[in-house]
Image: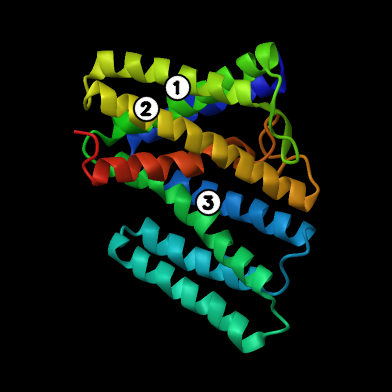
Amino acid sequence: MSKRIVSALIGAPLLLFVTWLGGFYLALLVVMLALLGLREFLLLGQKANLLNSSKYTVGLFSLVWLTVFLTGQTGWLLPLALTWFIVIFGQYALSYPRMGFTEAAFSFLAFIYPVALFTYLYHLRELPQGLIWCFFTFFLVWLTDTGAFFIGNALGRRKLAPKVSPNKSVEGAVGGVIAALLFSFVFWVITKEGSLPVVLLLALVTSLVAQIGDLFESALKRMAGVKDSGNLIPGHGGILDRFDSFLFALPLVYFALVLGLIG
């Protein structure tokens, strides 16, 4: 049995179990994943020569933000995110040209992408029926990846983004969407959550967004000249390699629920 399969058989049930527990246990897992993801993101930036001294500012602010998150003071999170925008681009303005705009933008994204976006797993879980929609997102992303892999291998002809991920095809992307739509239909039949057309539309958009998240992280690795973002998970690479699609998909499902689009 390959390392990839063994890691999946251990990691997936563990993620589902901690998400089922919710509360402080899930918040603690989110903080751990965010910090590990941040470390990988900063290393990618260093390898791409996009970061200098700003990595320390990013790390310190992220620790402060995650501490506030962990203590449950969620009302402070958005003001702190705005503060981060002011801090990093203020640092850019005061230290130009020693800090270039590219470094400032990458530093800003270092907080938003692996830190802030990870917390939407917790925020989604805290919503009414949030557990069901967390599981919906997990399985939809996993099945999108599985469908894209098998259909892409069997029928893939046209490259989706050859400069970013040469093995991905348009046919594979369509296969991933079809797998997501089939899953969402079964999900609706079992749970009767929302209306079927809305759930199918959410599945379609989430599947596409998840695939964009995968390509985005692949582009980061291309930029840094590495195959994986890390080596923490045997057979999968790093935290960002495993959660890149979720970082795009979870906020989408969260806001669909918060805005009342699923009713």
Q: In which quarter of the image is the C terminus?
A: top left
Marked residue nearer the N-terminal end (3 or 2):
3
Residue type, label 1: Ala
> Which element is circle 2 on?
helix
Alpha carbons under labels 1 and 2: distance apart:
10 Å
Q: Which residue position is annotated with label 2? A: 136
Alpha carbons under labels 3 and 1: distance apart:
26 Å
Residue that appears at 40% across and 45% down = 251
> Which element is circle 1 on?
helix
Camera-side residue: 42 or 194? Answer: 194
Residue type, label 3: Ala
Residue 150 visible to an observer of this rendering: yes
Residue type, label 2: Phe
Q: Nearer the viewer, mark 3 or mark 2?
A: 2
Task: Classify 203 as above or below 30.
Answer: above
Instruction: Residue 207: give x, y in percent of width and height.
Output: 47, 30
Instruction: Residue 49: give x, y in percent of width and height.
Output: 78, 64
Numbered tag placed on residue 34 in the rendering:
3
Q: Which residue position is annotated with label 1? A: 180
Instruction: Residue 38: give x, y in percent of width and height.
Output: 60, 55
Marked residue nearer the N-terminal end (1 or 2):
2
Q: Residue furthest right?
A: 225
Task: Classify 50 as above or below 151.
Answer: below
Residue 8 visible to an observer of this rendering: no
Task: Classify 254 as above or below 80.
Answer: above
Residue neighbourhood size for the residue with mark 2, other residues' Cα within 10 Å, grouped as few (<14), some (14–19), many (≥20): some
Figure quadrant of residue 41: bottom right
Alpha carbons under labels 3 and 2: distance apart:
21 Å
Q: In which quarter of the image is the N terminus?
A: top right
Q: Nearer the viewer, mark 1 or mark 2?
A: 1
